[in-house]
Amino acid sequence: MLPVLIRLGRWRYILPTLLIIGLTIASIITTLSTLRDEAIATHQNIARLHTYAFEEHFTQTLQSIDYTMDRIPHLSDTQTTPQVILDIFSDLLKNAPHLRSFSLVDMEGFIEVSSHQANTGKHISVDNFLPIPFGDVPLLRIGTPWMGRDFDNATPSNPQFLMPPESISFIPLLKKVFFSHKPYYLVATLNPDYFTNRYAQTLPRKDGVVSLWRLDGILLLSTDYSLQVGFSHFNVPVEQEDLLTHLERSKHSLISAYRLARLMPFVVEVEMDQTIALSYWDKERNKILLVSVLFISLSGILGLLHILRHDKETQRQKQQISYEKQFRIAMEATQTGLWTWNRQDDTITWDKQCYLILDYPPFSFSPSLEMIQTLTHPDEAKSMFVSIQEQVTLQGWFLVERRMKNAKGEWIWIQVRGRVIEYTPDKSPLFLTGVYINIDAQKQAEQLRLSSVAFETEDAVLITDAQEKIVKVNQAFTKITGYKPEEILGKTPRILKSGQYDKAFYKALWESLLDKGFWQGELWNKRKNGEIYPEHITITAIKDDKGIVTHFLANFSDITLKKAAQKQIHEMAYRDPLTRLANRHLLQENILKAVEKSSQEQIYGALVFIDLDHFKQLNDTFGHDAGDMLLIQVGRRLQDCTRQGDTVSRLGGDEFLILLENLGDNISQAMEQTNAVALKILSFLNKPFDLAHGNYRIGASIGITLFSKTTQDAEELIKQADMAMYAAKEKGRNQISFFTPKS
């Protein structure tokens, strides 16, 4: 009988021990599987982030090129002369390391002008570019990769002609543009090495590879050097299958991510190295196995530890009771109440403290969503549940502040915090719990502090909360912007935007504000009546005692008059007060710039000196008012005779001087162009002038000096043109003379 009892006593411990060992093994398997899934999921998220970053960068690059192509016709004044286009191409390529060349292609595919001159005259096909245009709106389109450095020595790729991984290649980009209503193609050659090097730095090849595919499956570039550029992913045609589905179906790595570009026809693929992704899991697996072996080894003495655990549990329960008592005292002292919300049937429970915060007797009514909305201030009730729903969906918890009516009919500020503690099987929030905290005293103190800070200045003041909602403005704000407080409160400062700044400007502003705590500078904003005006503004982040930003304070003043004064000073310094032409100071500056440019590029420029014949006779006969009227009309006619980039100036009296630039590198052609301008000037000046006493005719003597590679200063060149002008007068007036050393 005794042995039987002994065996039964052993099995009392053997069976629980075996059960614990079995559960431990099952737990190990489950934990390891979970850790492995989490490691894969983490690196999949990393891969997705990389696809987003790479797609954003490549899209922004293409948008920048698209914008640059749109600007080229405007920069050239719609002229398609090779020199004009070539100069523009050269300037645009200086700050574009991702581009190799720009080319202007006619509608038959022949290159007329190219920054890489060897491309000129070469014929390229303009058919295999995506997206295929729909309608008349020009689109930036991506071609298939070419093997070679540029079109002059390159061959387009195709599924039958793949490029070796180590070969030099480029990607053509094409867009239709119009010069004087005549269509052309602008083609830019994209340098794949720039992007593969950049992306390889962001995602080292030991960690993974990134590939860019055109939407028809053609490989544009990749940091995986084993892939051949120009290779088509659709090597086995699949009907009605897009590229994303095809990539997912044929992926080689367990950890891959894909992203379709928002605006352009390409897909970014990122494949992470599975070995690296699971290296952390391998380490954790070894740790868990070691711990599990120790746990299984110690499971045999669990029976002996039962009493100790029981004693510890008893002590813990006593401590828990003490802690709950202390917690309840703390909740009452800080006016904090507990609540729960069952989303399944929308039942809400309050503890006693929730009622006491609002001065109601405990449990004097049953809380409900309708009751809570009734007790909430109308300004917050409209958006309260929407805000809670958005925060819970996004992050699983929420924090809102609202005014609630207490038993005395007073509105007091309550902060409501909550967190989801149980979800439905489909991951929808099911059960929430949280606290009510009375923050009315804090809010009142905060309002007093804001009021004292905001109105210590006579400048316009705008205060927002941490979510950029406007909470207070002063009278100076209304005076400058035209918005009354009731029209602006609750809105964001975006209502004042003028539209003159891009996202990058505001991003830099916010980074400076959050990093330094303030930002100041000049902005152009918009008044209520739509008027755009300049202002000097200082934005300050207001923080609480814990260093958390609670509000933003903006002080600004209208500097419209200051800007106008600056413009007037500039006009006075650089413009002739009578004709509004450039004065001698501005002319000398422009001559120095033109001489430097001519020396560097070895092209010619010219100074044309014009002196009116018998102008003194007009002043003596009809007075200075008539002379001034004639000088104003002469200035207008001289501007009509010249190009937009030329400088027309009045030196004083009846002397005018014109600076002509970009006359080419051939002196004979430069003289012909300058002489043609001078003849045109004489023709315009010989026409009658409309003065108060009637029509009046007057002639002019013109002196010209050419310059190219010279060390002469502006005064010396003006002197040479002046000498040539006197030579023209000696010929009998109303003549043209070029400067020579004998002039």
Image (cartoon, helix red, strand yellow):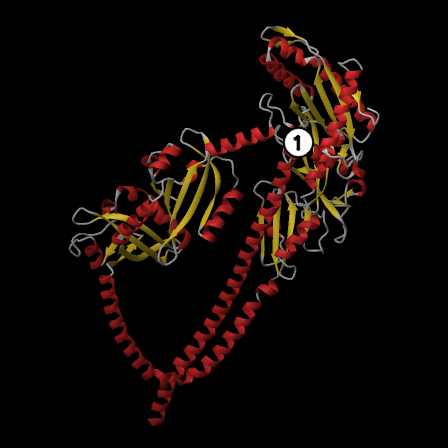
Q: Residue furthest front?
A: 620
Q: Nearer the viewer, residue 494 or 325?
A: 494
Q: Which quadrant would residue 656 be assigned to in this image?
A: top right
Q: Position of residue 226 (x, y in %)?
A: 72, 56
Q: Position of residue 242 (x, y in %)?
A: 60, 44
Residue 126 in sight in this render: no
Quarter of the figure that contains the C terminus: top right
Residue 351 in sight in this render: yes
Q: Which quadrant would residue 489 be assigned to in this image?
A: top left
In the image, residue 303 above or below residue 538:
below
Q: Position of residue 723 (x, y in %)?
A: 77, 24
- Element at badge 1? helix
Residue type at mark 1: give it: Leu
Q: How many marks?
A: 1
Residue under pointer 1? 75
Image side of residue 453 versus residue 73, left or right = left
Q: Who's the residue at 68% across and 36% down the image?
A: 174
Q: Position of residue 510 (x, y in %)?
A: 47, 47
Q: Nearer the viewer, residue 682 or 205?
A: 682
In the image, residue 179 above or below residue 161:
above
Image side of residue 539 versus residue 414, left or right = right
Quarter of the figure that contains the N terminus: bottom left
Q: Crowding near pointer 1: few (<14 within 10 Å), some, many (20+)?
A: few
Q: Which quadrant would residue 145 be assigned to in this image?
A: top right
Q: Residue furthest top?
A: 694
In the image, residue 36 above or below residue 542:
below
